Each structure stands twice: as structure tokens, then as C-alpha cells.
Image (cartoon, rainbow, N blue to C red):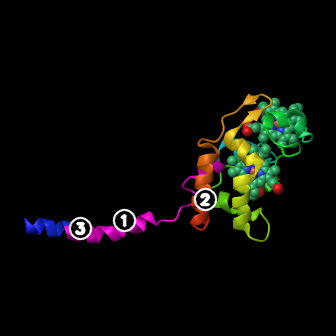
Amino acid sequence: MKTPFRLLLLGVFLLAPIATTSAAEPVKFGDALYAKFQHARCLQCHQFNSRRNNGRAYASHRSRYLCDNCHTPRITGLPRGEWMAPHERMDWTGLSARDTCLIAKRNLGVGDVNRKLVEHMLHDGRVHWALDNGMTPNGKFPSVPGGSDEWARDVRAWAESGMFCE
Ligand code: HEC
Ligand code: HEC
């Protein structure tokens, strides 16, 4: 009876460090955030000015001005002037996890890019519109699965792991 018990103990000692190592694996951008960045609610706005991806500026939206006339604050839940599309260099449609992450960081200018990025992801009104709202002048489009609670958890986990793009 003694030998199997010793073997069991030995097994626990051998396996324990392996289990600890995998628990400490860093959270990657590709784990959860990438799929959300590539969700239609983010993409439709981020590709708005992209000719390559036939963004709405080249397709459905010929007029590029006065967005609020149709996307009113009552519809979007945003203050007047906030509903607008980014420059086309912020279009990450179809890019890999690594490139999506690099573009998000590259467009934040100089300074503490990681801090600015977390700040933007947690507090930007348009990001929250995509996560929780999805309302357009033609009715509600599906918002990003998980909403802002799951999003905040994923953003914090990635931030605590060092925010690597790999
Ligand atoms: C004349 C009214 C009108 C104006 C002005 C307008 N939009 Fe729209 N927009 C709509 C309608 C209606 C929809 C929903 C139908 C569709 O998907 O095209 C829409 C949809 C969108 C979507 C897609 C939302 C999604 O997640 O699928 C985006 C992004 C968008 N508009 C951005 C803008 C921006 C940016 C401007 C200003 C540069 C603007 N719109 C100006 C009427 C307008
Ligand atoms: C209504 C349009 C709109 C929607 C929807 C939207 N964004 Fe943006 N986003 C913008 C604009 C405009 C900027 C540029 C803001 C600035 O320059 O201050 C921006 C900037 C960013 C940035 C800053 C870095 C960069 O790449 O420029 C990130 C990151 C970002 N958005 C992520 C997201 C994510 C993730 C979603 C979906 C959950 C999303 N956005 C939905 C309009 C939008």
C-alpha cells in the first residue's frame, strides 16, 4: 500500500509547478479583446472612411457632415458632436490580432500609450455605444457580446499582464 501512495505524492510534486506556470500565462490581446475589436459595431465606424473596405463614406453615406442630424444624442446616448468616424488609418478591418493591437497603440500619439489606451477602452462613449447600445436611425443593431462588464474585465486582465500585442 505504501508504494502507490509515494507515487501519488511524487506525482503531485512533479505536476504542481507545471500547473502554477500555466496559471501565470500572460493574458494576450488575442484571447478575448481581438474578437471584440473585430465586431461589426466597432468596424462599421472604424472603416467608415476607408476606400479599401468600401466604408460607408463611399457606400451608403455620401454626406460626410452633420452626423448628429440623423445619429441624434437621443438615439446614440452620446453628447452632441461625439458621433463621428475616425481617420481611415484607424481601420483595422480583417487585420491579425497583433496588427489590430499595434494600430490601436500607434494612433494614440506620444506619451504613456498603454495608459491612454486603457483609459479610452474603459471610458470612451463610442466604445460603450458599441458594447451596450447599437442604436442607429434605422433601429438597433446587435451590440458586442458580453457588454461593458465583460469588456472591463478583459481590458483589466490584459492591462495587468503588460498589454503586449503578441
Ligand atoms: C441622413 C441621415 C444620416 C447622416 C447624416 C449620417 N448617418 Fe450614419 N446612418 C444613418 C442610417 C439610417 C444608418 C443605418 C443604416 C445603415 O446601416 O446604413 C446609419 C448607420 C451608420 C453606421 C453603421 C452603424 C453600425 O454599427 O452598423 C455608422 C458607423 C454611421 N452611420 C456613421 C455615421 C457618421 C460618422 C456620420 C457623419 C459623418 C453619419 N453616419 C451621418 C443615417 C445617417
Ligand atoms: C461612432 C463611431 C465609433 C465607434 C462605434 C467606435 N469607435 Fe473607436 N474611435 C472613433 C473615433 C472618432 C476615434 C478617434 C478619437 C479621437 O481621435 O479622439 C476612435 C478611436 C479609437 C481608439 C484609439 C486608438 C486608435 O486606434 O485610434 C481605439 C482603441 C478605439 N477607437 C477602439 C474602439 C473599439 C474597440 C470599438 C468597439 C467596441 C470602437 N472603437 C467603436 C469612433 C468610433
Quadrant observed for ligand 1 in the rendered image: top right
Is 20 included in the stretch rendered in magenta?
Answer: yes
Residue at position x 26%, y 67% from top?
A: 12
Residue at position x 53%, y 61% from top?
A: 27
Select label 2 or label 1 by which is in front. Answer: 2
Q: In front: 8, or 164?
A: 8
**Label 2 is placed on what type of residue?**
Arg
**Label 3 is placed on what type of residue?**
Gly
Is 17 included in the stretch rendered in magenta?
Answer: yes
Magenta segment range? 9-37
Disc 2: which residue: 156
As drawn, is 162 to the left or to the right of 111?
left
**Label 1 is placed on what type of residue?**
Ala
Q: Categorize mark 3 by other alpha carbons within 10 Å: few (<14), some (14-19), many (20+).
A: few
The kind of secondary structure element at disc 1 is: helix
Residue at position x 67%, y 43% from top?
A: 131
The relative height of residue 56 versus residue 156 in the rendered view (above or below) is: above
Disc 1: which residue: 19
Distance of label 2 from label 3 (alpha carbons): 35 Å
On the image, the x and y values in percent for residue 97 come to 61, 57
Distance of label 3 from label 1 (alpha carbons): 12 Å
Precedes in sequence: disc 2 or disc 1 = 1
Disc 3: which residue: 11
